[in-house]
Amino acid sequence: MAMEAKNLGFFNWVSLSSILILAPLVCSKNHGNAANDLLEIINKNRTAQNLPNVTENRGLGCIALQYAQQCRGNCTSNNTLHCHAQEDDFTEIFAPNCGVELPTFGSISGTVLGCQQKYLHPQEAFSSLLFPGPKKLSLVKNGSFTQVGVGIIGGRKKGKGPYIWCVLFSDSKGRNATTFVLEDVGKGIEQKSGCYSGTSFDCSQGDKRFDVVRKLLVLLMFVSLSVQFFDLL
């Protein structure tokens, strides 16, 4: 009995130690929507310039995701993106794939694209990939822009790069609710990969190692609690 209790105590110690080690790894990972985070950073920069915020437009965000998805396979090993959508692609491919009601399609007056083989956190993507200098930052500071959409997508293999970031600005003067409107009362068509601004869906960073860590952490917590429960019986 003493040996059994000693073994249970050792197992609990191992479980608790594993949880304490793995928990910071899981908690430190950003599981939110990075597209929303980037949009927030854009507006903070506009606020610093005494400019009004650009409004988050879900339909425009989905179109940005579609643009990013079309650019898959065009990111070189040195993170150069060779991709340019035709004007008709927006109304004939991107908007229909999102479920944007075509009569509400507004103007797209600013486009920023970037790619990186590894995942970047939103602040790093903003400063070093998408808006690295005065020329690109001038888009953020453009007072005529009223709406924005952000789309992000990883490589074709889950958990792998390259990661494509796309930001679309619009200077449409109509209210946000009347431009780039998604069908089905704003739901639009579900997207199978990537994420875009205006939604609450998590944006996967595509690192499968942390999926394993999360599952292992849950398993260890379950086993540890089970052992403690049976100790009380």
Image (cartoon, rainbow, N blue to C red):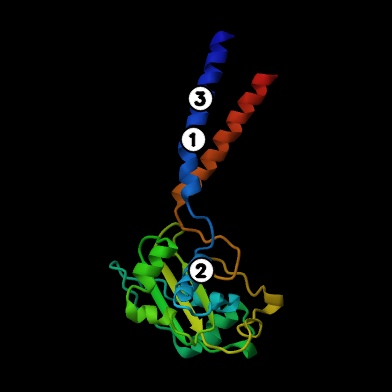
**Closer to the camera: disc 1 or disc 2?**
2
Tag 3 residue = 13
- The disc at residue 146 is none
Under mark 2, the amino acid is: Glu
Under mark 1, the amino acid is: Leu
Task: Tell which circle, 1 or 2, labels the residue nearer the N-terminal end.
Answer: 1
- Above or below: residue 155 compared with residue 59: above
- Disc 1, SS: helix
Identify the residue at image location x=53%, y=62%. Answer: 33
Task: Tell which circle, 2 or 3, labels the residue nearer the N-terminal end.
Answer: 3
- Disc 2, SS: helix
- The disc at residue 40 is 2
Image position, residue 147 (x, y; %): 54, 81
Q: In this view, does 52 lie to the left or right of 79?
A: right
Q: Quadrant of residue 160?
A: bottom left
Please tell me which residue lies in front, 33 or 86: 33
Tag 1 residue = 20
